[in-house]
Amino acid sequence: MTIYTHKHHIIPKHMGGTNDPSNLIVLTIEEHAQAHLDLYNEHGYTQDLVAHRMLLGQINKAEAIKLLQKAPKSLSWKKQMSKRVTGEGNPMFGRTMSDEHKKAMSKRKMGNQSPAKHYIVTDPEGNTHEAYNLAKFCRENNLNQGNMVKVSKGKYKQHKGWRCQSL
């Protein structure tokens, strides 16, 4: 009978542990699951509970990912993530936006909403409407957003008598 073993991080990576050999220990699958359950009971990190359940075959990888995405983030995790994107770790570090780009983005913003396309929509009676949120406009007027986008791109001439132009 073959006994399967795993390498377990004594201090898990999500708690700042490393792959240094002094931080690794070889455990059976059952021992590994118990180690994560013990860590969860001691520290309360969702990652350890999810690892425990995965090792016992109670959940699969896709279920584990969903659980981890929904889990509240610890203060230490938030600080670690903040540190990763501060200064030179930030992908925008050392880059600047041109004034023209800033103006273009500013024009496209509406309140606290993210930048959106601006549309001029003409109804079947010939009245024009401005739409910054085409999806919402289409819902309110019983229109199909995909078809209205195609109208704005010139693929369709009209949708239910409505015309649309992207600015």
Image (spheres, rainbow, N blue to C red):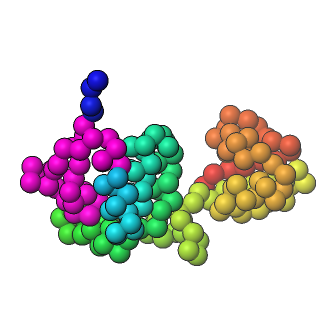
- The residue located at (81%, 42%) in the rendering is 159
Q: Can residue 91 be seen in the rendering of this structure?
A: no
Q: Is residue 50 magenta?
A: no
Picture quadrant of residue 29: top left
Image quadrant occupied by the N terminus: top left
Q: Position of residue 46 (x, y in %)?
A: 42, 61
| 45 sits to left or right of 87 | right
Along the line of sight, the residue nearer the viewer: 28 or 131: 28
Along the line of sight, the residue nearer the viewer: 116 or 65: 65
Q: Position of residue 9 (x, y in %)?
A: 21, 53
Q: Position of residue 108 (x, y in %)?
A: 54, 65
Q: Can residue 26 be seen in the rendering of this structure?
A: yes
| 118 sits to left or right of 5 | right
Picture quadrant of residue 135: bottom right
Image quadrant occupied by the C terminus: bottom right
Among all residues in the image, which is located at the extreme right? 125
Along the line of sight, the residue nearer the viewer: 150 or 31: 31
Magenta part of the chain: 5-33
- The residue located at (23%, 48%) in the rendering is 8
Q: Position of residue 3 (x, y in %)?
A: 27, 31
- The residue located at (32%, 62%) in the rendering is 39
Q: Number of numbered discs present? A: 0
- The residue located at (21%, 60%) in the rendering is 11
User: Is residue 90 depicted above or below 164 in this figure?
Assistant: below
Q: Is residue 10 magenta?
A: yes
